[in-house]
Amino acid sequence: MDKKYFVMKLIPPRADFALTMSDAERNVMLQHIEYWKPSLENGKLLVYGPVLDPKGVWGLAIVCVESEDEARALMSKDPALTINTYEMYPMRASVKQ
């Protein structure tokens, strides 16, 4: 089966979130980072991190998985969803392995 690629956009609860996180929010975001580490190590997560958009920082992840269901399952278990929202889009990717 061909691999499928998806872009995930993590949308914070407010534009200045990266600068004004409470301790509780920071803890959730640290859990978010830890959550994605195994996927980075096993090759399902190709890249992730904050995008320094002047309108407000947001998160980006690009995953390489077997199906959209698998991508949604990964996204749905992210602890960051307790305070953020996600958008997800399929993409055509050119990846040098």
Image (tube, rainbow, N blue to C red):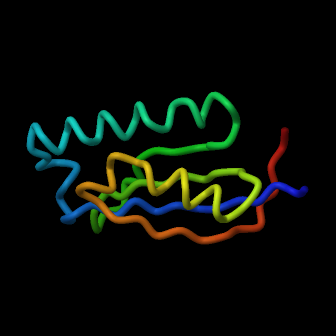
Foreground of the two, 12 or 19: 12
Point out residue 87 in the picture as x, y percentages from the top left corner.
46, 70
Q: Is residue 28 above or below residue 61?
A: above
Image quarter where the C terminus lies is top right
- Residue 70, picture quadrant: bottom right
Point out residue 50 in the picture as x, y percentages from the top left corner.
40, 48
Residue at point 59%, 44% (across, down)? 47
Q: Is residue 44 above or below residue 56?
A: above
Point out residue 23 in the picture as x, y percentages from the top left corner.
10, 37
On screen, residue 33 versus residue 19, left or right, reads right
Q: Is residue 47 above or below residue 87?
A: above
Image quarter where the N terminus lies is bottom right
Foreground of the two, 58 or 36: 36
On screen, residue 52 versus residue 55, left or right, reads right
On screen, residue 42 versus residue 59, left or right, reads right
- Residue 92, picture quadrant: bottom right
Residue at point 84%, 43% (across, down)? 96
Number of numbered discs: 0
Given the current orientation, which residue lies at the most extreme right position? 1
Residue at point 49%, 38% (across, down)? 36
Point out residue 76 in the picture as x, y percentages from the top left corner.
45, 57
Residue at point 37%, 54% (across, down)? 52
On screen, residue 20 versus residue 91, left or right, reads left
